[in-house]
């Protein structure tokens, strides 16, 4: 178990399309170790998601953290997960927007419109197929992470750059108006 170095905006690894992982390699010790280290790294820096290119591994792999349900004590909107070779299909044109942050763009937040409901396909860490519908905040997290696998950063998705804020200004002027996530 280890905390990995996070690539920051400007590093080319964040701007290339990550390579698919051969299904036969999913259960290899190096990939299983990478997954464990990514969970440690995400927890250390307080992210809700992390994509492998953010730790300098340009492969199609992402992890997401437990997402508690604010309306249900002890409940979860989504539980921590691993998605390999993810594919997202939009199931609606309805959008939702959160103030997103990113461990690769430290101290900034900006409001990003995302699709409200998606279909997620891919493989889990045991190589089993994932095929499920996801909506709301967990769908936003997944779209942010899958973008990382395609060299896209949340700033690219902003429709209104005037909402781009430092964390302190976000807390002062925007936090009461909108949700936030950091990955
Ligand atoms: Ni990010």
Image (cartoon, grey):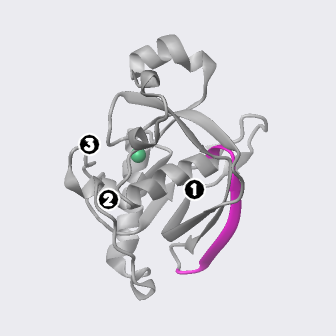
Lower sequence index among marks 3 and 2:
3
In front here: 6 or 133?
133
**Left or right: 50 in relation to 92:** left
Residue 155: x and y in percent read 40, 38
The answer to whether residue 1 of the structure is visible from this angle is no
Residue identifier under label 3: 9
| Quarter of the figure with the N terminus | bottom left
The answer to whether residue 49 of the structure is visible from this angle is yes
Secondary-structure class at tag 2:
helix
**Residue drawn at (32%, 75%) of the image:** 30
Q: Which residues are magenta?
A: 127-137
Secondary-structure class at tag 3:
loop
Residue identifier under label 2: 53
Q: Nearer the viewer, mark 1 or mark 3?
A: 3
Secondary-structure class at tag 1:
loop
**Residue drawn at (62%, 51%) of the image:** 139
**Residue drawn at (66%, 42%) of the image:** 95
Q: Is mark 1 within 8 Å of ligand 1?
A: no
């Amino acid at each position: 178990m280890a905390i990995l170095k996070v690539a920051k905006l400007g590093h080319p690894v964040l701007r290339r399309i990550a390579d698919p992982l051969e299904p036969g390699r999913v259960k290899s010790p190096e990939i299983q170790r990478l997954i464990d280290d990514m969970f440690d790294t995400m927890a250390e820096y307080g992210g809700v998601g992390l994509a492998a290119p953010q730790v300098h591994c340009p492969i199609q792999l992402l992890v997401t953290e437990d997402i508690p349900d604010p309306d249900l004590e002890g409940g979860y909107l989504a539980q921590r997960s691993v998605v390999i070779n993810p594919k997202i299909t939009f199931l609606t044109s309805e959008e939702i927007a959160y103030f997103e942050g990113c461990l690769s763009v430290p101290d900034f937040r900006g409001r990003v419109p995302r699709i409200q409901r998606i279909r997620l396909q891919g493989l889990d860490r045991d190589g089993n197929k994932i095929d499920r519908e996801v909506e709301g905040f967990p769908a936003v997290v997944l779209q942010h992470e899958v973008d990382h696998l395609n060299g896209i950063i949340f700033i690219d998705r902003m429709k209104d750059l005037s909402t781009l804020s430092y964390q302190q200004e976000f807390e002062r002027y925007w936090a009461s108006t909108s949700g936030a996530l950091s990955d």
